[in-house]
Image (tube, rainbow, N blue to C red):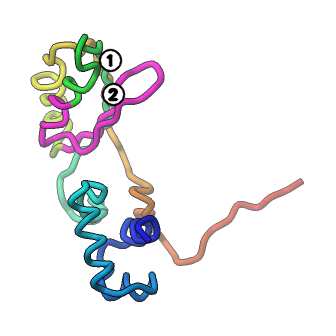
């Protein structure tokens, strides 16, 4: 049941326990207990709302930052990651494969605020060698949601032989 429950909640965290129980064909108490257990195990790590900031009349500046770093002898990349993750500007942090070690998603109010974060907080961390900042100019799809859907019909490209 947990996998099905997680998939339903991932798609719509607003579903009530009653609705989840009906969709899963389970008892409400059983579903409620399962959710509590998943939260305690940090499998359900939070509940979030997808916001289309372009339509919210708010100043938001997002950036993707790659970070080149050297692993530490005893902790590998975990210590550096914990330092970076504790900054409130950091929305998401990933250890990745490829030509860089970390990928960050940063939230700020302005480009200058993001630049100051990089210059004064991120770059001085021991083990960080270089960063590359790419500002997000427009979001088309976020967490599976299309941001500026014009109509309910899906437009398809014409296929020609």
Magenta span includes 91: yes
The disc at residue 102 is 2
In the rendered image, which residue does mark 1 sit on?
Answer: 68
Tag 1's secondary structure? strand
Q: Nearer the viewer, residue 82 or 36?
A: 36
Residue extending farthest to the right is: 161
Mark 2: few/some/many CA within 10 Å (<14, 14-19, 20+): many
Give how far across and how far down residue 102 sits, in percent. Answer: 33, 27
Mark 1: few/some/many CA within 10 Å (<14, 14-19, 20+): some
Q: Which mark sits nearer the N-terminus, 2 or 1?
A: 1
**What stretch of residues is rendered in magenta?**
82-107
Judge whether 103 appears above or below 61 on screen.
above
- On the image, which quarter does residue 5 sit in? bottom left
Residue at horizontal 13 percent and vertical 28 percent from the top: 116
Give how far across and how far down residue 62 sits, in percent. Answer: 27, 43
Q: Nearer the viewer, residue 151 or 142?
A: 142
Tag 2's secondary structure? strand
Residue at horizontal 15 percent and vertical 18 percent from the top: 125
Give how far across and how far down residue 65 sits, in percent. Answer: 31, 30
CA separation in Å, label 2 and label 1: 7 Å
Determine if residue 64 is in view: yes
């Amino acid at each position: 049941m947990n996998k099905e429950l997680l998939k339903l909640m991932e798609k719509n965290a607003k579903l009530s326990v009653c609705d989840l129980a009906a969709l899963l064909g389970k008892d409400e108490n059983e579903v409620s207990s399962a959710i509590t257990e998943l939260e305690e195990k940090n499998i359900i790590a939070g509940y979030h709302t997808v916001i289309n900031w372009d339509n919210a009349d708010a100043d938001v500046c997002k950036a993707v930052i790659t970070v080149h770093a050297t692993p530490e002898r005893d902790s590998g990349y975990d210590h550096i990651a914990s330092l970076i993750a504790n900054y409130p500007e950091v929305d998401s942090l990933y250890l990745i494969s490829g030509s860089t070690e970390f990928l960050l998603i940063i939230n700020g109010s302005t480009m200058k605020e993001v630049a100051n974060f990089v210059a004064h907080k991120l770059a001085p961390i021991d083990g960080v060698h270089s960063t590359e900042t790419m500002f997000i100019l427009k979001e088309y799809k976020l967490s599976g949601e299309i941001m500026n859907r014009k109509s309910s019909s899906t437009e398809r490209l014409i296929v020609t032989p």
